[in-house]
Image (tube, rainbow, N blue to C red):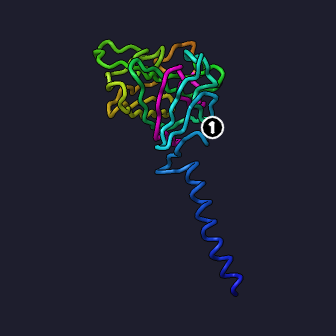
Amino acid sequence: MRMKSRFFFFAIPLFVVTTVLADHHEKKEDGFTALNLSNMKTEGNWQAMDDGVLYLEPREGEEGWKRYHHYLWTKEKYGDFTFSFEYKYGEGGNSGFYFRCVDQKDPVEGGFEVQILDSMGKPDGEMGHHDNGGVIKTKGADTNASIPAGEWNKMVVTMKGSHLTVMLNGKKVQDFDLAEKKPEDKPLESEGYIAIQDHGLPFWVRNLKVKAL
């Protein structure tokens, strides 16, 4: 009887520790899965900070955006999804949110990108597809939802079928059928990987989470 009691009390903290570790790596809230360096992949210099922020500090010689293996990638493919995250950049900051990427070696040709760019102050009517919130080679943002460099932005991207919705800082910047607007020679796959771009510039992200729809 005494041996059973000792085992019971030993098992309780072991269960608690195991639960805490599992929760640290992958936490689900309302169907969302929290993402971090333990369940994403990258060869870039993304660093986990104490406050849950992932900081991208490009190493010497790392410039431009064609180092695709340095992007922050999901390990799984997603078809219909909602992806929510917060980010910030310095003055002149540049990054991008990629989705439906079938080939991680070339997400530009095999996927789509929502532009992340320091477009503060640009008039709504002049927002092109390479400006903040635009879909590259497809459509500019409906409104300029940019805020000053150094402040935290929040982007929520929802893809359902071929319909894309992008909320940026509480404003709807995209809401259209991607199959109708995309370049004719560019395929829209039914599923693909999701990534955040390494553009060779300092960049911060936090509260990344995804939900399959």
Identify the residue shown where x is 37% and y is 21%. 141
Q: Is residue 184 left or right of residue 3?
A: left
Mark yes or no: residue 141 visible: yes
- The picture places residue 190, in percent across and down from the top left corner, at 59, 30
Q: Residues within 10 Å of mark 1 (few under 14, many from 20)?
A: few
Amino acid type at image mark 1: Glu
Q: Is residue 182 left or right of residue 109?
A: left
Identify the residue shown where x is 65% and y is 72%. 10
Identify the residue shown where x is 46% and y is 31%. 204
Where is residue 164, by image quadrant? top left
Q: Report the front residue among 62 and 148.
A: 62
Q: How many labels does the image show?
A: 1
Return the residue found at the far bottom. Answer: 1
Mark yes or no: residue 191 visible: no
Q: Report the front residue among 14 and 125.
A: 14
Q: Report the front residue among 150 and 138.
A: 150
Find numbered disc 1 in the image and state the secondary structure of the residue it sits on. loop
Is residue 35 placed above or below 150 in the rendered structure?
below
Instruction: Return the residue at label 1.
Output: 76
Quadrant in which the N terminus appears: bottom right
Q: In this view, does 14 lie to the left or right of 175?
A: right
Q: In this view, does 115 lie to the left or right of 63?
A: left
Where is residue 44, by image quadrant? top right
Identify the residue shown where x is 28% and y is 15%. 123
Q: Is residue 194 magenta?
A: yes
- The picture places residue 178, in percent across and down from the top left corner, at 47, 23
- The picture places residue 53, in percent across and down from the top left corner, at 48, 38
- The picture places residue 99, in percent across and down from the top left corner, at 54, 28
Q: Give the range drawn in magenta.
A: 188-213
